[in-house]
Amino acid sequence: MGNQDYKILVVDDDPGMCQTISDVLCEEGFSVDTLNESVEASRVLTREEFDVIVTDLRMKGLKGLDLLGVTRKIHPPPPVIIITAFGTIESAIQAMKMGAYDYITKPFKMEELVLTIQKALEHRLLKKEIIRLKKEVEARYHFHHLIGKSPSMQNIFSLIERISESSSNVLITGESGTGKELVARATHYNGNRKEGPFIALNCAAIPETLLESELFGYKKGAFTDAKSDKKGLIFEAKEGTLFMDEITEMPPTLQAKLLRVIEEREVRPLGDTVSYPFDVRIISTTNQDIQALIREGRFREDLYYRLKVIDIEIPPLRERREDIPLLIQHFIAKLGKDSKKKVSGVSEDALRILLNYSWPGNIRELENVIQRAITLGQHEMVLPEDLPPLMTRETEGDALEKALKMRYTVDQLEKEYIKRVLIEAGGNKSKAAEFLGLDRKTLYRKLREI
Ligand SMILES: Nc1ncnc2c1ncn2[C@@H]1O[C@H](COP(=O)(O)OP(=O)(O)OP(=O)(O)O)[C@@H](O)[C@H]1O
Ligand SMILES: [Mg+2]
């Protein structure tokens, strides 16, 4: 950029001074605006962008310091060079404290002013570059509502990009709270079906008997309660995405029917005599070891291959700890806004605990921990004392002794124990459930409350 690309505003209530400075700067090739009226200058500043502002300190109307205050509200604030007479040096120091770039005292040589302006411009360019780079990095770590800088998350972002033109079915696997639903939504809203609906069906939440009619619909009179025709979700999701959460909870008979439907690309609603074609992409999820379920004969292998044309595996948070600081900042910004508390970050000690914890409940648990810390905390920073005590003592000695000392309720002790067993089982929930003598559904329910 040549000097003519830089706009400089000179403000001085002495027209002679303004003119002299302007002449010199114009000779240097800068674009210069001069104003003798400081109130007018403050108005111009809100409308126009300048690269450097040169202002006298003592003026009629608005003082130089007030004008400086106005510039501090601009993003990014332009550098301000204060011109000051010998007697007002104290105000000049105050101006520096308020964020002025530099000051020069009258009388001064014009070369001195030009040199200071050159330095101020360099400073501004660097600042702008930093802002630009920061934005670029942030953009790389954000994908739709997903956040992650770890290689595994970056791979997921680029995979979603690569499949944006495809309508192939996607199977998303990962432990509870790892962000499966968020990944599913990002896949939908980044794909060529984004104008179509995203229809969600949780296979674990709907009684087995209703699942089929929800999915495929029915004709009036198909069964006692079928008072009128009902359109199945597979038709509701036309030209969009059918999101089937916790797919492994689907009963075997329905698995067989879904397989047939996918292969034949048409559906016959309950009680109907005709089959209808449908146009959906299926994105399904599971937080279970689906391979094990296939080996045990509890999930159909042929259906598995139909669903996982593309598979996305989201690693647990403990395997991508580099994402933790980013996620903490994200949740503090998001949740702090709602609570109106001024929390700006976590202390070093608290961060150490958060980084070392095993996060069996993954990102959902992290979000809850931050929510709790914001609610309970009384400082600008989240401190270790704002974190759940169970967390800070995760790896410490005798649990019963500790439980006694801490006056844990049975509920707290149970949560602690479940988390511990999960770590022991390497995060494998089927193993953990067996160890704990719980059925898997109960374990999932309990994990969700952690
Ligand atoms: N990468 C991420 N960036 C920001 N927030 C995330 C990320 N992953 C998950 N979350 C947040 O964590 C919470 C849990 O995510 P989500 O519901 O997608 O998990 P899930 O894998 O579907 O869990 P479950 O198996 O229990 O259904 C949500 O509030 C979600 O917004
Ligand atoms: Mg989910």
Image: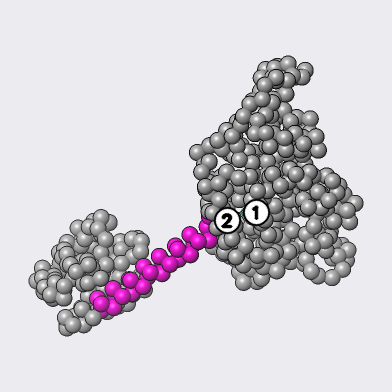
Q: Is residue 240 left or right of residue 205?
A: left
**Above/below status of 224 relative to 241:** above
Q: Is residue 333 left or right of residue 251?
A: left
Q: Position of residue 119 (x, y in %)?
A: 29, 78
Figure quadrant of residue 271: top right
Residue extent of the magenta highlight = 116-143
Q: Earlier in the sequence, mark 2 or mark 1?
A: 2
Q: Residue 159 bears which disc, if any?
A: 2
* Ligand 1 contact, mark 2 (Cβ < 8 Å): no
Q: Residue furthest left?
A: 16
Q: Counting other residues with Cα less than 10 Å from the Cα at mark 1, is it few (<14), some (14-19), or many (20 or more)?
A: some
Which image quadrant: the N terminus? bottom left
Q: Which residue is mark 1?
A: 312
Figure quadrant of residue 16: bottom left
Is 135 magenta? The answer is yes
Instruction: Determine if residue 336 is in view.
Output: no
At a point 50% along the width and 38% down the height, the residue shown is 195
Element on which disc 2 rests: helix
Q: Position of residue 159 (x, y in %)?
A: 57, 56
Q: Position of residue 284 (x, y in %)?
A: 67, 44
Q: How many marks?
A: 2
**Above/below status of 390 relative to 283:** below
From the image, give the main secondary structure of the stretch colored magenta. Answer: helix
Instruction: Determine if residue 23 is in view.
Output: yes
At a point 19% along the width and 69% down the height, the residue shown is 4
Q: CA distance from mark 2 to mark 1?
A: 8 Å
